[in-house]
Every structure is written in structure tokens, then in C-alpha cells.
């Protein structure tokens, strides 16, 4: 995530209930999913539509992960939603997404991918996915085609069952507190990561995610706490280094 329009977020979100919050994947969890993916995508005896559905499910998951999208936002994407752009170096081509509103108080927005997934997701959306459809369906996708579609061109309505089968294969159906993972966990993972590891203003993160600062406070309080502790440790380390440098100059 790089340049984001600097305006106040205008939306609210519905937080997970206190009794059954939707958890995010830790870095260890996500790495484990990546390890399981090759075998899950290509098991023996899985053929035809089921194999294709799994592949598209995973690319959808990566799209949710790279852009921090709500599940419904990911489902409604079309090839016309892809907005190729040039990176700061003037050479790298990457993809922004035009995301339509899926909730009453959410405005349409243009979303950039998080930095460490920029190249991977841009290659998938601009090259791999169109080539896959051409090989599978015998035609190139058009601008009006859904990003995730059946052979007849209709949109795939849900990847929930496929994702559940991935979680089952990974033996990763819930977190250490017993809360079940689902596709929404992917959005939570990305937003949690942005809060914890970047120094972007929470308002910028909220605008990028199509939510509000108030909702970040409610839903991602744990991540904001991690961020505050990290920033305090970094501040103390800077002070320690400055003190050490002053002593060495004497």
C-alpha cells in the first residue's frame, strides 16, 4: 500500500461479535496455508470443475489478502475492475482495483495492493488468470466478465466450501481460542498486518480498507496495541542510540 487519498473515512462496519469474533491468521498460520496449497490444489482423482474451482478459490483468496477486501467485494470484481498502473520506478506495472460498494454506508474506492504482494497479485490478475481462462474455456475474458466465473461466463457465487476444505486439509479450522476461521479472516489478516507492521496513519489504513477509524478501534484493538508497543520500543531504541552517540563524541 503506497499513495492513498488522504480524506476522512466515511463508512462504518459491523464488528465481529464479542462472543464469536472472526479471527485473523497469524504469520505462522498463513505460512502453513501456503505450504499446504500445492497438495490441496492438485490431489489425485480431483478433476474438472472441482479442480478449477479450487484454483480460482485460491486466486480469490490471494486477491482478498493483497487488497484487504471484504468477501463480497472480492466476489463482485470484474475484469473491468482491474486498473493497471505504473510503479514509482516508472517501470513496474501493477494493478489497482476499482471496488464497488457492497454495504449501504461504504463508498466505491480504488485500492492498491499491499507492498509485499504487489508483484505477485499483479502477475496473477493481469497474466495468469486471463491465460488460465483461455486455456480452460477456449476464449479470452472480456471486460464485463466476472473475475471468478464458470465456463458459461456466470459469476461464481461462493468459495466458502472450497475454503473450508483448504482449512480442513491444513488442520487449521480455528485459532488457539477456538474461534473459527473463514474467508473474512483473510481481510482481518491484511488489516491487522498493516496496523502492526507499518507506520501509516490509522486514518489512511481505514480509508484504504473502506472502513472508519472508530471501527479499527473496535475490531483491531489488539493490533493497535501491538503497534503502540512496537513504536514505543523503536522510540526508546532511537533514544538509546542517540545517547550512545553523544557519549562516543566526548
Image (cartoon, rainbow, N blue to C red):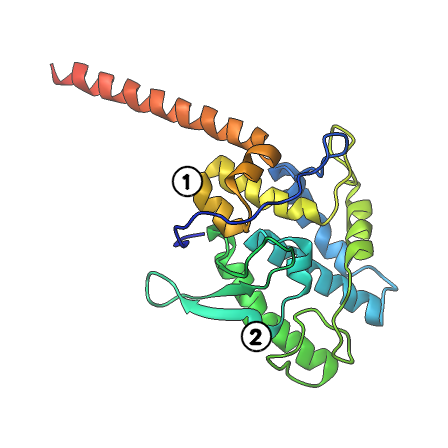
Mark 2 lies on a secondary structure that is helix
Q: Residue at x 60, y 54 (%)?
A: 69
Image check: 81 left or right of 154? left
Side of 231 where 196 appears, left or right: right
Q: Report the front residue among 49 and 144.
A: 144
Q: Residue at x 45, y 42 (%)?
A: 203
Image position, residue 184 (x, y; %): 69, 47
Q: Residue furthest bottom?
A: 139
The residue to which callout 1 is attached is: 201
Seen from this angle, which residue lies furthest right?
45
- Residue ranking furthest to the front: 104
- Quadrant of res 217: top right
Q: Which mark is residue 80?
A: 2
For the residues labelled 2 and 1, the Cα–Cα distance comes to 30 Å
Number of labelled discs?
2
Q: Residues within 10 Å of mark 2 (few under 14, many from 20)?
A: some
> Between disc 2 and disc 1, whose residue precedes?
2
Residue 219, percent from left and from top? 61, 36
Residue 39 location, x and y as percent?
Answer: 76, 55
Amino acid at each position: 500500500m503506497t499513495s492513498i487519498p488522504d480524506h476522512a473515512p466515511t463508512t462504518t462496519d459491523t464488528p465481529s461479535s464479542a462472543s464469536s469474533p472472526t479471527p485473523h491468521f497469524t504469520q505462522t498460520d498463513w505460512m502453513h496455508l501456503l505450504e499446504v496449497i500445492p497438495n490441496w490444489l492438485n490431489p489425485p482423482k480431483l478433476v474438472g470443475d472441482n479442480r478449477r474451482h479450487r484454483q480460482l478459490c485460491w486466486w480469490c483468496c490471494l486477491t482478498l489478502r493483497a487488497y484487504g477486501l471484504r468477501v463480497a467485494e472480492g466476489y463482485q470484481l470484474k475484469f473491468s475492475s482491474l486498473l493497471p498502473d505504473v510503479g514509482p520506478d516508472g517501470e513496474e506495472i501493477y494493478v489497482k482495483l476499482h471496488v464497488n460498494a457492497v454495504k449501504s454506508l461504504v463508498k466505491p474506492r480504488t485500492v492498491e495492493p499491499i507492498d509485499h504482494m504487489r508483484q505477485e497479485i499483479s502477475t496473477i490478475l493481469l497474466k495468469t488468470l486471463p491465460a488460465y481462462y483461455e486455456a480452460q474455456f477456449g476464449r479470452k475474458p472480456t471486460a464485463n466478465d466476472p473475475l471468478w466465473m464458470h465456463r458459461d461466463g456466470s459469476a461464481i457465487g461462493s468459495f466458502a466450501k472450497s475454503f473450508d476444505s483448504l482449512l480442513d486439509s491444513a488442520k487449521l479450522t480455528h485459532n488457539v481460542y477456538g474461534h473459527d476461521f473463514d474467508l473474512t479472516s483473510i481481510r482481518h489478516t491484511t488489516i491487522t498486518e498493516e496496523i502492526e507492521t507499518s507506520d501509516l496513519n490509522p486514518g489512511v489504513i481505514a480509508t484504504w480498507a473502506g472502513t472508519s477509524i472508530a471501527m479499527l478501534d473496535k475490531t483491531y484493538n489488539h493490533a493497535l496495541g501491538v503497534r503502540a508497543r512496537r513504536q514505543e520500543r523503536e522510540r526508546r531504541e532511537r533514544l538509546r542510540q542517540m545517547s550512545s552517540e553523544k557519549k562516543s563524541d566526548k
